[in-house]
Amino acid sequence: MARTVPQAPGALPLLGHGPALRRDPLAFMMSLPAHGDLVRIRVGPVSALMVCDPDLAQRVLVDDRTFDKGGMLIERVREGLGNGLGTCPHGDHRRQRRLTQPASSKTLPVVSRVACGAFTRSARWRGASAGSCPEGWEMR
């Protein structure tokens, strides 16, 4: 039995939920869970599904075989940025990840060192004593 996804109330003809999103995006987004775990919104002629349940959101983000990247937005981003790790579909992801892994392993220590330096410097700006980096930030 297929269930229909409820639409958030307050959509205007032609504009959809665009004015509400523009007026107060946080209040609009915070109102959505009252209408279900999955809610349809419209911005102009474009419809989108908003995931309002934390468990469902995790499932959507982790289970990329069921919830593969796609749709108009991803296709446009892919046109501009290419078929990279962040925009590629599930079938290409493993190959893309293996291509980028050597670069990641070389840059991670540098990124870690920069993040740690930024943390200690910003602590001094706030007047805090210059302590050590948070656990897990130090270079491995």
Image (cartoon, helix red, strand yellow):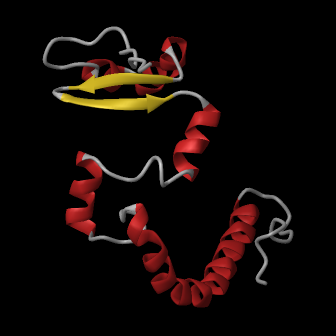
Residue at point 70%, 70% (across, down)? 121
Foreground pick, 126 / 11: 11
Left or right: 21 as drawn, with respect to 136 = left
Name the residue furthest top.
10
Q: Position of residue 67 (x, y in %)?
A: 45, 47
Foreground pick, 116 / 112: 112
Q: Position of residue 5 (x, y in %)?
A: 40, 19
Residue 7, located in which quarter of the rendered image?
A: top left
Residue at point 69%, 81% (across, down)? 113
Residue at point 44%, 70% (across, down)? 93
Foreground pick, 5 / 136: 5
Quadrant of the frame with the N terminus:
top left
Q: Compared to 31, does 67 lie above or below?
A: below
Residue 3, located in which quarter of the rendered image?
A: top left
Q: Compared to 105, does 6 lie above or below?
A: above
Q: Position of residue 84 (x, y in %)?
A: 36, 72
Left or right: 114 as drawn, with respect to 86 = right
Quadrant of the frame with the C terminus:
bottom right
Left or right: 41 as drawn, with respect to 110 = left
Q: Position of residue 101 (x, y in %)?
A: 54, 84
The tally of labels here is 0
Name the residue furthest front.
1
